[in-house]
Amino acid sequence: MLEIENLSKSFGGLKAMNDVSLNVGKGEIVSVIGPNGAGKTTLFNLITGVYQPSAGDVRFEGQSIVGKKPSQIVNLGVARTFQNLRLFTNLTVLENVLIPQHYKLHSTWLSSVFRTPGYRKKEREMREYAIDKLAFFGPRLMSFRLHQPVYVLSYANRRRTEMARAMATGAKLLLLDEPSAGMNPKETREITQIIRRMRDEGGYTILLVEHKMNLVGEISDRVVVLDYGEKIAEGSYKEVVNDPKVIEAYLGKKAEGEEETEIQKAAKMDGRSSE
Amino acid sequence: MGAVLAIIIGRMVYLNGINDRFGTAYFGRAFIESLKLGSLYALIALGYTMVYGIIRLINFAHGEVFMVGAFLTYFLFTLSPYPWYVALLYSVFIAYGFMRILEFFRGNLRDPVVLGGGALMLMFATFMLSTQTVNLIIALVFSMLLTGVLGILIDRVAYAPLRTAPRNSLLITAIAVSFFLQNFGLLVFTNRQTPFRPDTLITNPLTIGGISSNWLLVAIPVITAILVVALTMFVTRTRLGKAMRASAQDAETAQMMGVSVNRVIATTFLLGSMLAAAGGAMWGLNFGSLNQPAVMGILPGIKAFAAAVIGGIGSLPGAVIGAMVIGFSENFLTAVFPRTNNFLGITEFKDTFAFILLIIVLLIRPSGIVGEDLSEKV
Amino acid sequence: MASVSQRIDARTQELAFPRHRGRNILLTLGGLLALVIILWFLEGLGSSKLNQALALFAIWGVATVSLNLVNGTLGILSLGHHGFMLIGGYTTGLLILSETARDRILSSGRSSMNETTLGLSLSRGLDLIGLDALTTPETLWIRFVIAVLVGGVVAAIAGLIVGIPSLRLRGDYLAIVTFGFGEIIRLSASTRIFAPLTNGALGLPGIPSEFGKSVWWTFGFLAITVFIISKLKYSSYGRAMEGIREDEIAAEAMGVNLAYHKVLGFAISAFFAGIAGGLWVSWLGGVRLDFFLFTLTFFFLVALSAGGTGSITGVLLGTALVVFVRQYGDPLEETYALATWLIIAGVTLLLAAAATYLYRTFQRQRPRMHPAVYGLGIVGLIAVLVGWLAPNLGILDGTFRGFGMRAIFLSVLLIVIMIFRPEGIVGRREFNWGALFGERPDQPTDEERKQDAWLSNAQLNRPGGAAAAEAVAEVQAEVPGKPLLETGDEPVEAEDK
């Protein structure tokens, strides 16, 4: 579904991304991990058209999307969430989930002013779709919450709203940037279930940036590891977690002859547990 | 750039050909007049650029500060001597302004030198203002100090409470302050155009190489140069000046390094307003009159702002360069395309041209000639 | 998706869609009827000053509501509205000017206009295309409407142009560019390029003023404007525009075409500004360049900020305030004895103190008698006493003309609002019929409140009783210590983790 080929990006002298290639098949959940500053969000920005690549290609469903504007890319079926949350803070939850559907509205502004039957029907459909997506999160974002401005919501609820918003675009491929950031273990478990349901019930293909290894391990079909803007490993979770290059990127090189440190043991344990 | 220059020179030669009037004297005069006008704009532009550099605010009210400075100079000069209580009232603020200047060198308002200097200035100013008609220079200096204090006051009352507010709110407030000052000027100063032709040294006639004018032709660029050099020295040599530059780069970090950002901002307004006041006084002398308060500061203010943007907002040398660009394009271009038999001249487009130039620069190169890159990070 | 839909409860279904459409429409019609009756009554009072003020309110209301589309809904500070009004006003004026007035201009000899430009009259145009039935004095009103609409369209085209920089610039710089455009329009209107159309500094005197001064015509236009702008704001397009205001980058990431919506906003806003301009020149009875100074936009900014940029109701309230000050504020600009001025100043301070006290009480802020309130009150009291009891003391002996007092008042008001209540009097709350009925869609019902524990845990969302209470205990065991709301249960002891 998504093909990234030899993607590179330089900012002046700094090479933020160097010759990265990766593919995401329909219905897969692929996680991108790596130390901070490895270029994960840059990758998302490149895919969604916020940055233009210096070299390489990004293809979605066979069609190259390089050079297109972000709003056009949404049109084609790719949507994202943001690492630091970029909700429409003063607007209500419902409005946040309706705005992503606006681009599909084919009524002109005049017909919306005069509320033609065509417009009203479309508006009704948009709202049905909106609460449909919000329902993924159970009763949390339902009922009276629909009309509450986002700034009264708890942090976890805001993260969920942002994910619902991305789903509401009607996209087929979702790019989730650290969806569980700032969540406690219980909330993280819940989000993990939701992401899985998004793929199983919702039919979404998901590319996900994460730091929490338990989440990554539990739902990823494949894991890709970035470091300093380059792909250093790819494979199943188990393979990647035991890859010495990956361990080195996170923890540093093991000195010659040194015993495995306590930290490295713990990391391995962490990787294998499903807590 | 080169093409523009070529066109101008070509045009000058052409004009010289058609009419002897357009000789070296004519163009020489236009050149020096442009220098003079550019200097005046520079004094105002520096205020805009400094304030924007530190708090990212386009101080809409700066043009009105310029106007107040002009009127204060006029009144101090023409209405003194005052009754003692009026003189005292003025002197309190003059002394305060003076103390803030001394603070530059001593670092602290409570320093004995600063306090002593303030007391001396208080006595001096009260004495001068109550016993005689002060001469123009003293009126100018007093007016600069008073206007500087006005600048500090404006910041404290209207802008400081909005440090954390969205930028749009701040701009709207600046517009409100601008209108307030315009109408306050109407109320307190006058609602008419006021002639300002004092019989002093500066306005005496002067003839250089066939160009007859007055001493202001030389005095204005010279005084401006002195003030700009003084400003540059303040900003580069003194502690407070360094604090200003640090805050302009990164206010948060400067604060963490112990810089009192609020004091720095107040000082920025002080300096900018003082320069604007000097510009205002000399403007009035130059044109022989002061336009009515609601109108006087508007066009020069906008043109000076355009100058600051063209030169690169946030940069001091940029402001001066930009001001020269505006001064020359306004004055010299008008001379190069004068009213002739076949051509009505471009004088009536003078003001529109400044706005157009401003918009073009903002659209094409908002960082200006010298300036920094101000794009947003995702 | 069948399994998902089942999870949507009745109340969500209810709240997600606009309700009571029929009721609301009837109420709105009733409201309009009430408005008509009130206007009829007020007009019947026969005070021309009142009628003029009402008409001005409606005209400036068209301008402010349209300005709010850009400043409030789109979140772009636009400072060039007076320019659009100028374009609309001059277009309307030029088209509708009577033949007598045109002859007068031509024969005055000082005009920059010529035969061609003076010939740009709607009457002649209609004549040309054979609609001479519409050129009679009886049909002046039709021509006026056409002239105003054409003015709006021309202004809208200017709006498209001004909207283009908004695609590249943000915030302050964009505001300055819009200000620049407004001033360029105004300044060039007097230059020789446009003077043939505008008659330069002389302007176009003699515009029929029965429409601009008429309460019915102006409120009619206002009603249409409010209808269109509010329907737009509360539609998908309005939401998209608000999304742009909230977070442009996120909006684009959600598929909103920034360029289209920004330019659309500017164009529509300019259209209505043009209409307001046409009405404004009719109210004034003529067109002149100094009717369209930046001061006009300043008044609009005060109206917007004082009322509240988040709601059309607020904007109209702000406009009413500004119009009131403008029309009824002239007593402030007379000459009075200085002592009288002192009293006026004192009374103002006392009123400000009282207002602050009331505001703090209303907002339940403590302490009510904040030092500011005391200070203002005491200074005000002293001022009043001195002015009253010792009117000839020293410098108080003299008179003073209150030039520009209205503008001073409005600018001080704007500063105070920006500092203390930037969201305006009304904030973001819009008037809606539902509010009158106590509908609070953003609050849980009593039922829901009781079940609050359930809302935060999907496992508990099962109907009723004992099974549910068990589930509550389960959850409490997992998250030790903190009791779930006011269920009245003891917190369960935490198990060791």
Image (spheres, helix red, strand yellow):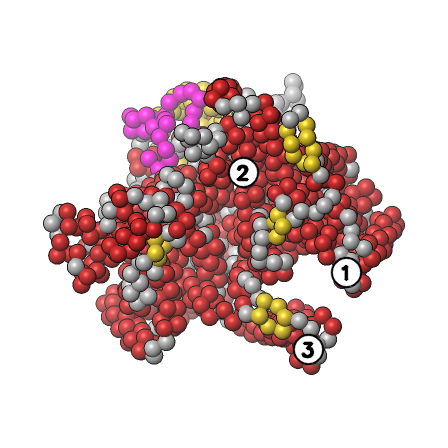
Q: Quadrant of residue C6?
A: bottom left
> Residue B178 magenta-drawn?
no
* Viewer-side residue, A47 vs B191: B191
Which region shows up in magenta?
A: A50-72
| Residue C425 x %, y % | 48, 65
> Left of C145 or right of it: where is B174?
right
| Residue A104 x %, y % | 27, 43
The residue shown at (45%, 30%) is: B340
> What numbered label is drawn on residue C391?
3
The residue shown at (33%, 43%) is: C196
* Viewer-side residue, B208 vs C140: B208
* Viewer-side residue, B97 vs A54: B97
Q: Chain of mark 2?
A: B
Say if mark 1 contacts mark 3, CB within 8 Å: no
Mark 1: amino acid: Tyr
| Residue A227 x %, y % | 52, 26
* Disc 2 element: helix
> What numbered label is drawn on residue B306?
2
Query: Few, some or many C-alpha atoms within 10 Å of disc 1 (few <14, some 14-19, many ≥20)?
Result: some
The residue shown at (32%, 29%) is: A60
> Residue A67 magenta-drawn?
yes
Distance of mark 1 from mark 2, alpha carbons?
A: 39 Å
| Residue B43 x %, y % | 65, 39
Distance of mark 1 from mark 3, alpha carbons?
A: 22 Å
Q: Earlier in the sequence, mark 1 or mark 2?
A: 1
Residue that badge 1 annotates: B82
The residue shown at (55%, 70%) is: C334
